[in-house]
Amino acid sequence: MADSTFELDAFEKRMKGVVESLKRDFSGLRTGRASAAMLDPIVVDMYGQKMPLNQVGTVSVPEPRMISVQVWDKAAVSAVDKAIRESNLGLNPVVDGTMLRLPVPPLTTERRQELVKIAHKYAETAKVAVRNVRRDGNDLLKKLEKDGQISEDEHKKSGTNVQSLTDDIIGEIDSLLKTKDDEINTV
């Protein structure tokens, strides 16, 4: 996006990126069944670097209530174990050599409520990010009008388009949240 022009598509792309990020976050919230995607948000601190779990081992789901992680480097097993325990997913790995088995316990009422709160937090963070993109768009429009590159009418029209886009994306976030909420409470 060039600083001297206003392109709604660039802002739409950024907002849709926020939605994709939210979908990834939601996929990591477990709903009672084992899923390899549950471990996607986990980052392992290894060799002084933070690495996604899927870059230090193979994640598989051998049973409906079991996830296994085959760590490639024996020295990384304790770091992977620690990252999983600190992930707030409620999983307690059982270490067997370089294999970590993660039994997925059934969801308790308390855990469901906790997951719903986490889902709402993710959604609120996404909404804030979308509003920040809207603010960037509006700031650019003000600057372009002040610099005489667009008229007041163009500013208002483009501002209305940015707001409409923001409303649509926030509606999509609310819809994703409701779906995830229902999923957590019905499994």
Image: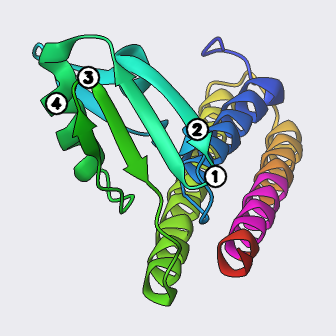
Dot 1 corresponds to which residue?
A: 64
Tell which tag, 1 or 4, sits nearer the viewer. Answer: 1
Q: Name the magenta segment's main secondary structure.
A: helix
* Residue 78 included in the magenta stretch of the image: no
Residue 50, by quadrant, is top left
Q: How crowded is mark 3: few (under 14 residues within 10 Å), some or many (20 or more)?
A: some
**Disc 1 vs disc 4: Cβ atoms closer than 8 Å?**
no
Pick whichever, 101 or 131, lies toward us: 101
SS at mark 3 in the image? loop
Going by the numbered disc 3, the residue's amino acid type is Thr
Residue 4, by quadrant, is top right
Give the mark, 3 or 4, whose residue is nearer the N terminus: 4
What percent of the width, then of the height, locates residue 116?
55, 75
Dot 3 corresponds to which residue?
A: 98
Quarter that holds the C terminus: bottom right
**Disc 3 vs disc 4: Cβ atoms closer than 8 Å?**
no
Q: Residues within 10 Å of mark 4 (few under 14, many from 20)?
A: some
Tell me the tag on residue 104. Answer: none
Quarter that holds the N terminus: top right
Give the mark, 1 or 3, whose residue is nearer the N terminus: 1
* Residue 84, above or below 183: above
CA separation in Å, label 1 and label 2: 7 Å
**Disc 1 vs disc 2: Cβ atoms closer than 8 Å?**
yes
Dot 4 corresponds to which residue?
A: 79
Give the mark, 2 or 4, whose residue is nearer the N terminus: 2
Going by the numbered disc 4, the residue's amino acid type is Ala
* Residue 177 included in the magenta stretch of the image: yes
Going by the numbered disc 1, the residue's amino acid type is Pro
x 32%, y 28%: residue: 99
The region drawn magenta spans 168-181
CA separation in Å, label 1 and label 3: 21 Å
SS at mark 1 in the image? loop
